[in-house]
């Protein structure tokens, strides 16, 4: 049987101003070099992470989408409390798929907090990346193309990973889900396969080619939570300690 998927979103109302921007109440909590606990399963990353998302390395994708008269689309993987989602929204990405296997932090800071707000263009999926990819493939199985026209696959101009991944996973998402002409993916890549204690920040194009990389960003040495879907994930961030159920 197909697995049930869950979408969490703030309730829209005709009385609300539809131009009201996305906001997470956790947005102002970020600080340089330090992670902030947002829930049992989510940390708000050091501010260096959000500075990197906002950097010129990813600006080309947005500019190209605007130039081609298409709405810039972003995929926020490991969205947590929605801080990275707000960074993307402020950059001009008003069509965003945000996902995280745990919806606790998103619910707290985006849905339940009076300061939080989620417009219709932002969709949250309480899914890990593997289940989301299965869902995306199902929705795009009868489409083709490069994402630039009607009837094409719903490809993304930018993809941001907010947890450590092996290079193969980053390349898979880049090659399959990015706009073929100008898409960019940002991810913290393990310095060695399945080594979760140190990552290198990398920007990839739609062919998985590395365009930029950094071991350190400012005063912060790049290190993220591990990918919970991987069998080599161990410790408090991983199953069985965090309650995550791996796809079968």
Image (spheres, rainbow, N blue to C red):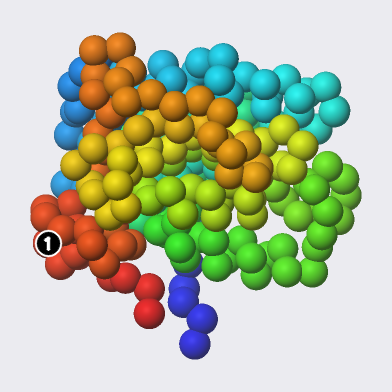
SS of the residue at dot 1? loop
Q: In the image, 34: left or right of 6?
A: left
Specify the quadrant that holds the C terminus: bottom left
Which residue lies at the image location 37% right of the left edge and 41% below the top edge?
Answer: 189
Residue 138 vs residue 164, the one in the foreground = 164
Question: Taking 84 as reference, is 143 above or below it?
Answer: below
Outermost right residue: 150
Residue 191 placement (x, y as % from top left): 31, 41
Q: Is residue 115 visible?
A: no
Q: Residues within 10 Å of mark 1 (few under 14, many from 20)?
A: few
Residue 247 placement (x, y as % from top left): 38, 73
Q: In the image, 151: left or right of 58?
A: right
Q: In the image, 203: left or right of 44?
A: right
Question: Taking 187 as reference, is 57 above or below it?
Answer: above
Which residue lies at the image location 16% right of the left edge and 47% below the top edge?
Answer: 40
Mark 1 = which residue? 241
Q: Quadrant of residue 21?
A: top right
Outermost front residue: 192
Q: Is residue 147 visible?
A: yes
Residue 44 placement (x, y as % from top left): 27, 31
Q: In the image, 132: left or right of 45?
A: right
Which residue lies at the image location 82% right of the left edge and 59% below the top edge?
Answer: 144
Residue 97 vs residue 34, the one in the foreground = 34
Which residue lies at the image location 24% right of the left edge and 24% below the top edge?
Answer: 221
């Amino acid at each position: 049987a197909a697995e049930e998927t869950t979408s969490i979103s703030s309730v829209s109302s005709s009385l609300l101003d539809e131009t009201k921007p996305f906001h997470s109440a956790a947005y102002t909590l970020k600080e340089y070099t330090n992670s902030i606990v947002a829930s049992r399963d989510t940390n708000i990353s050091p501010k260096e992470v959000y500075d990197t998302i906002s950097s010129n390395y990813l600006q080309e994708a947005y500019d190209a989408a605007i130039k081609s008269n298409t709405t810039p689309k972003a995929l926020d993987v490991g969205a947590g409390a929605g801080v990275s989602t707000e960074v993307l929204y402020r950059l001009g990405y008003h069509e965003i798929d945000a996902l995280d296997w745990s919806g606790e932090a998103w619910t707290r800071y985006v849905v339940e907090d009076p300061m939080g707000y989620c417009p219709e263009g932002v969709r949250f999926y309480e899914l890990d990346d593997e289940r989301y990819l299965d869902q995306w493939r199902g929705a795009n199985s009868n489409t083709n193309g490069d994402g630039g026209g009607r009837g094409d696959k719903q490809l993304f101009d930018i993809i941001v990973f907010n947890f450590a991944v092996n290079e193969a996973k980053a390349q898979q998402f880049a090659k399959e889900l990015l706009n073929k002409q100008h898409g960019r993916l940002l991810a913290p890549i393990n310095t060695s396969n399945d080594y979760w204690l140190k990552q290198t920040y990398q920007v990839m194009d739609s062919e998985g080619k590395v365009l930029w990389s950094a071991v350190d960003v400012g005063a912060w040495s790049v290190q993220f939570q591990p990918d919970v879907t991987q069998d080599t994930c161990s410790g408090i961030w991983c199953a069985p300690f965090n309650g995550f159920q791996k796809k079968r």
